[in-house]
Image (cartoon, rainbow, N blue to C red):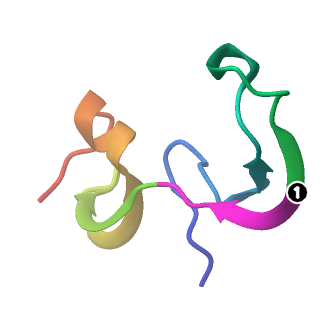
Amino acid sequence: MSRICVITGKRPVTGGRISRKGQKKKSGGIGTHVTKTNKRVFRPNLQRKRIRLSNGSVKRMWISAKALKSGKVEVV
C-alpha cells in the first residue's frame, strides 16, 4: 500500500542531498564546491487515523498532519 494522503494527495517526492566541501568565501576561503549528490526521498508526515466518511461509516486511512490540523476530516 502506498503512503498517500487520501485528503490532500500528498505523496513521497524525490530530490537530492548535495555534499559541499571547502571554506566559504565569507570566511576567507575560495568558496565551496559540490563533491557529490545523493538521491533521497522526502516523505510526507502521514498518520494512520480512523476517520468518519461522508456516508457515516468509519474507516482507517492515511491522513497528512496538515489535513488533521486544519480539521478537514472528522477523527473518531
Quarter holding the C terminus is bottom left
Q: Residue at x 56, y 60 (%)?
A: 43
* Identity of the residue drawn at 61% across and 48% down: 9
Q: Front-most of 67 and 73?
A: 67
List x then y, in percent, for residue 25.
Answer: 75, 19
- Say whether residue 56 is magenta: no
Give coordinates of residue 51: x percent, y percent.
25, 59
Classify 65 as above or below 39: above
Residue shown at 41% from the left, 66% from the top? 62
- The secondary structure making up most of the magenta span is strand
Magenta highlight on residue 39 = yes
**Identity of the residue drawn at 27% across and 43% down:** 68
User: What's the amino acid at mark 1?
Assistant: Thr
Tell me how many marks there are. Answer: 1
Q: Position of residue 19 (x, y in %)?
A: 75, 54
Left or right of 36 on screen, residue 23: left
**Residue 43 or residue 40, whichever sits in front:** 40
Q: Is residue 68 left or right of residue 35?
A: left
The spot of residue 17 in percent (x, y) is 73, 55
Residue carrying label 1: 35
Q: Mark 1: which secondary structure? A: strand
**Seen from this angle, which residue lies furthest front?**
28
Left or right, 57 with respect to 33, comes to: left
The span shown in magenta is 36-44
Q: Residue furthest top?
A: 26
Q: Is residue 44 left or right of residue 25?
A: left
Q: Residue furthest left?
A: 76
